[in-house]
Structure formats: C-alpha cells, structure tokens
Image: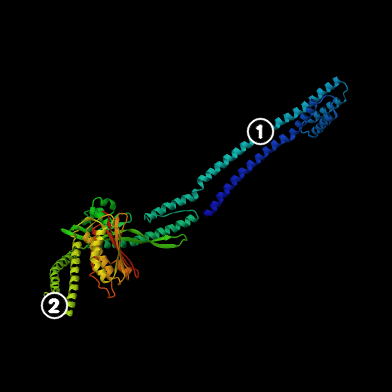
Amino acid sequence: MKIKTKLRLGFGFLFLIVLSFGLIALFFLNELSDKSKVILKDNYESLKYVAAMRSVLDENSIPLTRTAKDKFEASLIREGANITEPGEADAVKELELSYKRLAESLTDSDRLFYLKGLRLALQKVEALNMKAIFNKNERANETSGRANLYIALSATTCFLILFTFIINFPGFVANPLAEFSAAIRQIANKNYKQRLHFDNDDEFSALAISFNSMAAKLNEWENSNLSKLKSEKLRIEAIIAQMQDAIIGLNEKGEVLFMNALASKLINVDEKSAIGQNVNDLVKKSELLKRILTPDPDRKPLKIYADDKESYFQLENREIVIPNFEVGQEDTLIESSRSAGSVYVLKNITQFKELDEAKTHFIATVSHELKTPLSSIKMSLKLLDDVRVGGMNPEQKELIHHIREDSDRLLKITSELLDLSQAETGNLKLNFAQVKPFAIVNYALDAVRFQAEQKNIMLEVNCDQQLPEVNADIQKTAWVLVNFLSNALRYSSEKSKVVLDVVQLSSSIQFSVRDFGKGIDEKYQKRLFERYFQVPTDGQNKSGSGLGLAISKDFIEAEKGKIWVESAIGEGSLFLFTLPLA
C-alpha cells in the first residue's frame, strides 16, 4: 500500500470518528432542547391565565364590573383553549361553573360561597399545571442524565481511539525515516556495508532498494580506490620528507597534517607525535613555531641557529583552497572554493644572505676607498682654478667644469653606497635629538637654494615655527628632505614652483614636497623606494643612482616614521614622510 493511501485512510478514519461523536452529541442535545421547550410551551400559558383570573378577583369587588368580567372571561376562554394535561378539562369546566354561579348569585352570602368555590377551581387548575411542570422537569433531567452518559461514553471511546491512532499511526512514517537517518549516518562514517530492508510495498521500499544500490557502489569504489589513495599518500609524504625546505601543513581546524624532519628539528618537536595535534598546543612548546604562525607583513627573513651556525630562512605561507560545490536558491549547482588549511614553508636562504653580505661589504670597501682619490681630484681641480698656478683657455675651463661635475656625482654615489651598506648591515648610526621641524626645513633649504635659483624655480615653504619638536637625527632627516627637493627641482620646468608643507597630525609631524612636473606612472610608484630602481626618463633629466629614495626610506623608518609618494601623470608628484612627536 502506498504512503499516500495510508495517509488518506488514516485521516479518513479520524474524520469518521469526529463526525460520529458530533452526531451523537447533536442528537442528545436536540432531544434535551425539545424537552425544555415542552415544559415552557405546555404549562406556562395555563399558569399565566390562572394568575390573570386570580388578579381580577383580588383587585375587584363582587359583583364584578363589566371591565373585570371581560378580563376574567378572556383569560378563562384562553385557558379553555389551552388544555394539555389529564383532568385539566374537568377542572376548567368546574371553574366555568363556579364563575357562572358567582355571576348569577344575588345575595352576599351566596356570592361568598361561590367565590370560594371559584378560587378552589383556580387553585386546582394551577396545581395540575405545576404538577405537570414538575413531572416534565423530572423527565428532562432523566433525559439530560442519559445524554450526559451517552456523550461521556462516546467521548471516552473517541479519545481512546484517537489516542491509539496518534501513538501508532506516525510510526508508519517516522520509523522508516529513523532507519533511513541511522543508515545515512553510517554512510557518512564511511560504513558502506550498511543496508536497509523493508517488506512493505510502498515508497520506502523503493527508496531502500535505491539506498542499498548506492551503498554497494560506494563500497565498490572505496575498495577499488583505497589502495591507490594510500599509495599516492605515501608518495607525497616521501616527497615532503626529502625536500630541503622545512614544511608544516595544517588543516582548517588548526591540526597538523604533515611535517617533515627538517621542520620538526627546527621547532624542536617530535615529528610523529606532532601529527594530528592542534597547533595551539604545540605553540606553547616552541617559540619559533609561534613566530612562524604569526603573520609578518614585512616578510623579513628568520634568523635560526641550524647546522651549527646562524642560518637565515624565508617564510612562505600558502592557503590550501579546494573546490566547494553548493546548491543555490534555484536548485542550481554553484562552484566556489573554500579553505582546507595552510602550508608553511621555511626556505633556507643562508647562502644568498652570505652572498648579499659579501656584496654589501665589497660595496662599502670600494666606496670608502674611492672617497680618498675623489677628494684628491677635487683638491686638484680647486688648485687648477687658482690663477696663481697658471691660466687656462676656455676649452680647458669647460673640461675642468665637466670633471668637477662628474667627481661631485661620483662622490655623492659613494656616500650613498656607504649609507646603504650601513643600513643593510644594521650599522646605521643616528644621533637623535629633540629638534624643531622649522630647523630641519631651514637646513634643507640652504642646501638646495642655489640649485633653485639656477633654474629660476620658486620655493614655497609653509611651516609654522611653533610646531612641536620631533625626536630625530637632524642631518639624516634634512638629507631626506634635500633628496625630495633635489628630485623635485630636477623634474620641474623653469619658472615653476616647488611647495614644501609641514603640518601637525594627531601624533606626528608630516613633511611633504610637491612639484608640478610630469608626474610618475602608477606602475612605477610601488618600486620607487627599491634599491637601484630608476624611473625611465626621456633623456632630458639626468637620472641618479637609484639609491636616494631607498636610503631615505631606511632613514625615516629607523626614526619610527613612514614615507610614501602620491602622483599622477600630468599632475606632478607629492613625496611625504612623517615623524612621531617628541
């Protein structure tokens, strides 16, 4: 039998039970209502007529007046037409006879005698109707009691039937669903040997057949692919174990999925016991693991003691993203992705770090050695300009001028290389002091004023002398400002202007230099502060060494400040840096 048929029969049976109880209750209530109506209809009118006739006798003297007689006779006629009880007809005849004799009597004694007989007749009619009311009331009470008994029996029977139905009938649907739910949980736990068996010829039986077929297919797939998956897993584990980089893999719950020997050695935990543990528990045992898991926006190399020496490792973090299929509101399959964990890789860059340090030391040595001959060249050029040594023709003076420019440029490059090598080796020395921003600005303006006058460029300065002091190295900070101003003057056209603004922010002082040149393309702005990077030029402006902005960045960040650029093609450039208040 189909489930739909079972439901129809069950609810049809409930409908019949409720309908039967309603009909029984309606029958007895209707019978009780009829009995009550009979009591009021049959006897109430007779009592009303008797009361009216007695009222006429009580309110009027004998003999009765014409009006009193009319009232009495009208009630008597109505009572004669409303005879409903046994003996009531004789009592009415006796009442009519007594009234007739009272009306025909001539003496007062006769009138009193017949008046007494008339009242007795009225009392007899009244007694008959009162007795009838009492008897009918008793019969109505009996009917009410019987109705209550039958209704109570019907209600009890219906309650028992409905209670039994409520307890048993949902089992036809709920029990198979419970078995399906338990079987599905077994399948979710990868117990593909789970089967369902239903003997009824309904939808559940057909669904059980489909479920068993699905479980059999899953069991077959599991058995055929399990060995292959295990083999691939062992292969991946072997590859991870043989890699020269330290690797740690976590799932989305923060549990360790894999860890090679090098990683376990670096963080000083047992490789086998760490697998499956939550990383929050391992962090308590290893400070290095805590540094690995903590995001570092600067991506600085980690210095770790390994292989009996200080080694450098570059940390890389990759999130594991897997496909995720979801059903949308319109029952369409939507493909998305979700995180399944993270992989942390520590690459050993010690060899490259050593090469970089060797390069830095080489640059520092060469730069230092070049400063001495360059100083000698500048001294010789100064002597050649002295007329006491000897005169020179115009061609010789022009050559001397070019040699001086090139030697100045070489001396500037060697100074920048020395500063850069100090920053890279961590030997950058700053002489901090509390200084007014106005003093730094004046220091920088004195260095570039001659260059501005040569190009006829106006320097507009907006700096309040009452600005609070900053904690900085005045020479290094002024050097950064000079670098900004020199670049602005170099890339500005003649008879233009360069604006230098110094303003106070909430907890810092902001220095900015704006020029109105061609501007810098957005694709070059992110690399402006990299070492040796130079923005391509059109050949009209001599480019520097590509170290000035990189060294400026090192100086400002060493002073706990920030440095950046804002520019757009055709709108000029704005170079800014901030220093914290003293």
Q: How many numbered discs sit on the rendered protein? A: 2
Q: Is residue 3 visible?
A: yes
Return the x and y of residue 125 as percentages of the image width and height: 77, 28
Q: Residue furthest top?
A: 109
Residue matched to label 2: 391
Residue 129, placed above or below residue 276: above
Viewer-closest of 443 and 179 = 443
**Residue 223: x percent and y percent?**
34, 60
Residue 284 vs 557, above or below: the answer is above
Using the numbered discs, state the Cα–Cα distance from disc 2 to disc 1 in whole angstroms: 153 Å
Tell whether 141 sits left or right of 398.
right
Binning the other alpha carbons within 10 Å of mark 2 as few (below 14), some (14 to 19) or many (20 upward) gives few
Closer to the camera in the image, 236 or 359: 359
Q: Disc 2 on helix, strand or loop?
A: loop
Tell me which corner region of the image, top left, top right, bottom left or bottom right, holds residue 33.
top right
Q: Is residue 165 left or right of residue 376?
A: right
- Is any part of residue 533 visible from this angle? no
Report the front residue among 459 and 473: 459
Residue 552's quadrant in the figure? Answer: bottom left
Question: Whole-percent x and y of residue 409?
Answer: 20, 71
Q: Answer above or below: position of 516 versus 60.
A: below
Tag 1: Cα neighbours inside 10 Å, few (<14), some, or many (≥20)? some
Who is closer to the viewer here, 70 or 521? 521
Q: Is residue 394 left or right of residue 561?
A: left
Looking at numbered disc 1 in the image, what kind of residue is underneath it? Asn
The reply, left or right, for residue 551 in relation to residue 377 is right
Q: Which mark is residue 441?
A: none
Please state the horizontal and vertical placement of residue 497, each as a whole percent of the image. 31, 68
Instruction: Identify which amino acid the numbered label 2 is placed on.
Output: Gly
Marks 2 and 1 close (CB-CB < 8 Å):
no
Instruction: From the image, tell me which residue sits under label 1.
Output: 141
